[in-house]
Image (spheres, coloured by chain):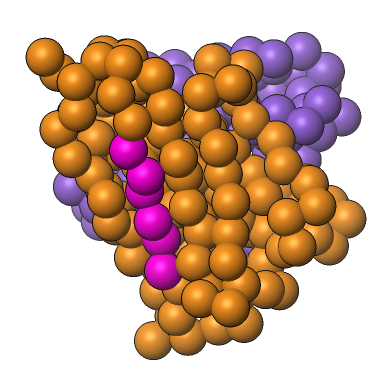
Amino acid sequence: EVRLVESGGVVVEPGGSLRLSCGASGFTFNDYTMHWVRQVPGKGLEWVALISWDGGSIYYADSMKGRFIISRDNSRDSVYLQMNSVKNEDTAVYFCVRDPGYGSGTSPYFDLWGQGTLVSVSS
Amino acid sequence: YELTQPPSVSVSPGQTATITCSGDRLQNYYVCWYQQKSGHSPVLVIYQDNKRPSGIPERFSGSNSGNTATLTISGTQAMDEADYHCQAWDSNTMTFGGGTKLTVL
């Protein structure tokens, strides 16, 4: 079965750190660019970061630059999001998504989403 | 970059629903659309302005011209009730619209 499964969502205090993981299965992971997207419950979607198939291209949303780090391990079919210096406004469901577009020389689009993992920032 | 969507759209069953997404010179960018039903992850319904992924019904179509991209659902069904999000990529940054809640009543 083709799927993405996120994990690592927890309750964390402001200023703290956590690492989200996303495991892929059912497809050739290193053929794809991967992203993280987040959503405050009841609100819209917000893009977080992109990592190309080989990690050679990495981009972040401005509000995450310098605090979040996206990485991947193709030997483990996994992508990660290290979240540092978290703020209350980082509270959201974080989705791992697959992108067949960017690596093909066109604009990114997301054809596979995980179920999401909830990060709550609270003291 | 900003994308603007109407917060809500209502449509009667069997009628055509139109959801817009506006942005400066949006026609210069590829636009995608995602459907998100309550409690579920988003699903891609349109990519590269007007392409449908496999498994998406033909009643879903998209267009992009000028400053506005449009998602059209012909013969809307009750199962189409959901939030719809548009998305575009510019200058190595992804932008989503605020989302539109489609009500079928």
Image coordinates of residue B55 in percent, x first then y, are 49, 74
Please name the residue shown 51% across and 23% down the image.
A67
Which is more toward the observer, B7 or B10? Answer: B7
What segment carries the magenta color? A18-23
Please name the residue shown 25% across and 15% down the image.
A14
Q: Judge whether residue B76 can be spotted in this image.
A: no
Please name the residue shown 55% across and 83% down the image.
A27
The purple one among the chains is B
Question: What colour is chain A?
Answer: orange
Query: Is residue B28 left or right of B105 when viewed as pictured?
Result: right
Image coordinates of residue B37 in percent, x first then y, are 26, 48
Image coordinates of residue A8 in percent, x first then y, are 27, 50
Res B24 → quadrant: top right
- Looking at the rendering, in which quadrant would you find the C terminus of chain B? top left
B19 within the magenta span: no
Query: Is residue B39 left or right of A72 when viewed as pictured?
Result: left
